[in-house]
Amino acid sequence: MKPILIVQLHRIGDIVLTYPLFLWLKQVYPHNPIFILGEKAFWQDLKDVFLGVSFFSWENLSFLTKQKFSLIINLSHRKESAFLTRDLQAEKKIGLIATKNNEFYVLGKWQLYKNSLVHNNRHNSFHWAELNSLDVIPYSLLKNTKWKKLPATSPKKIGLFLGASSKDKTPGASFWIELTQKLLFKGYTPFLLGGEKEKALAQQIEQECLLPRQANLTARFALKEFSKSLSYFDLLITPDTGPMHIAVFMGQRVLNLSLGNVSAWDTGPYLPGNFVLRPLISCYPCWECNKNLSCNQKVEPRDILSFLEHYPLLNKHIGIVSRRRGLFYLEHNLPYLSFKEEFRSFWFFYFGYLFGLWPEDRAKRCLNHIFTLRSSLRKVWIQEIAKFLKILKKDIDEEYWKKSVPFFRIFTSYVLLNLQNVNFAPKEIIRSISRLEEMLDWVKKA
């Protein structure tokens, strides 16, 4: 059978997040070999963990160009991936692709939606593991996948993974020192984990907290040994990073410190039963930070101790990974949902309806609930629709999405990117206007 190629040129975490796609592809295409093209520096150690996949790098390009693929899924945003997707032979292609005239398009409605989230993920709640998959995997398969349930045991041995791809995604040295001290005082057994980059920090923590040397495991393991060692810990506390995703898919329970310009809705620990510690501030989630990383100051070691002492109950900062309609969902125990969460729910059900996952009824009920809580929003919503209709019917402003109100940008961004993707074809403009008019009818009747 012809092979399937996944193109993922980004970092380790992005490659690991293709793991659910790989599992689902094996079920839908059981006889097709699966290849992953990525940067060798990122997958070199993963090949021993990611069993059943053949990894390739640019060094293997001559081999790949001779292949005839059943399917190519380009999950990379880099231009060279678009040229490669264009030039390789395949019966079907998904993701960013270049034309012979070096113009760029996105194939696949879910990949297009994912691209529309760049700098605009405030109200998204579709996890990237699912966005990677929905164009090629039946929703029924995703919805009915039974993931292994993690045991609800009280943690004693706790791994602290100190690093991430960016220092903005990790708390500072003082945080890790204070957390280690508090864990020791409360009778927990902490272990320090990381690579060469975290070695100096780990030595500082070791010295200041009087940790035994055997508790400092930084730079001790290759990725394969690290993945095997995870079963030793009861809980891994970690930023959003590649090793976190490896731990998740190895069945290790994690508490994700979701800091910096990341969103747990996009790239948090995917399997149910894991936890996310996230600051509840108005700018979260974000794509780029313009608030001097204030979120990193909003999470304190005492929050983690509060979580551990009430384990597995949730404290005010903790979200627990669950499922909604069979897809990724973050639950929390707040007595109310912020309006950001109400809008997030609406857009989840709206785009699910728009792309054919389910009927419109749930989205309409969400909209009705928003107006019940704050009736004044109805007028604002009608005004936004009217402005956007005017834009679409006259001179289309491709940057208009940045000018619309925050709760509406996820829609305006998608519509405008979709129109760009088809060179503003009149049929698609008419279809977009119809969608807006349908939504306007919902708003008036809600």
Image (tube, grey):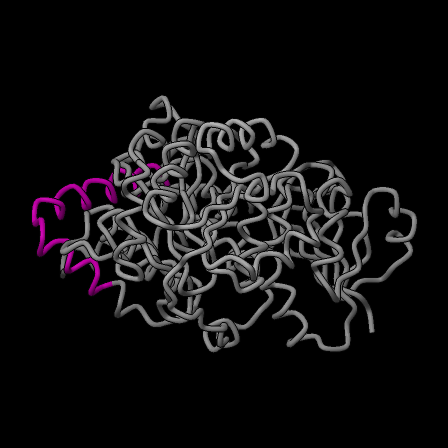
Seen at 80% across and 59% down, the residue is: 54
Q: Is residue 359 visible?
A: yes
Seen at 31% across and 62% down, the residue is: 312
Q: Quadrant of residue 388?
A: top left
Q: Main secondary structure of the magenta part?
A: helix
Seen at 50% across and 71% down, the residue is: 142
Q: Is residue 438 visible?
A: no
> Is-magenta flag for residue 388?
yes
Q: Is residue 233 above or below residue 279?
A: below
Comparing 13 with 152, the one in front is: 152
> Is-magenta flag for residue 247?
no
Q: Quadrant of residue 263?
A: top left
Comparing 156 with 16, the one in front is: 156
State left or right for residue 348 relative to residue 421.
left
Residue 127 placement (x, y as % from top left): 46, 55
Q: Is residue 51 above or below residue 315?
A: below
Q: Where are the magenta residues, as a range?
A: 364-392
Seen at 61% across and 70% down, the residue is: 24
Considering the image in quadrants, where does the N terminus appear? bottom right
State left or right for residue 296 relative to residue 282.
right
Comparing 267 with 275, the one in front is: 275
Residue 34 placement (x, y as % from top left): 75, 64
Considering the image in quadrants, where does the C terminus appear? bottom left
State left or right for residue 174 relative to residue 32.
left
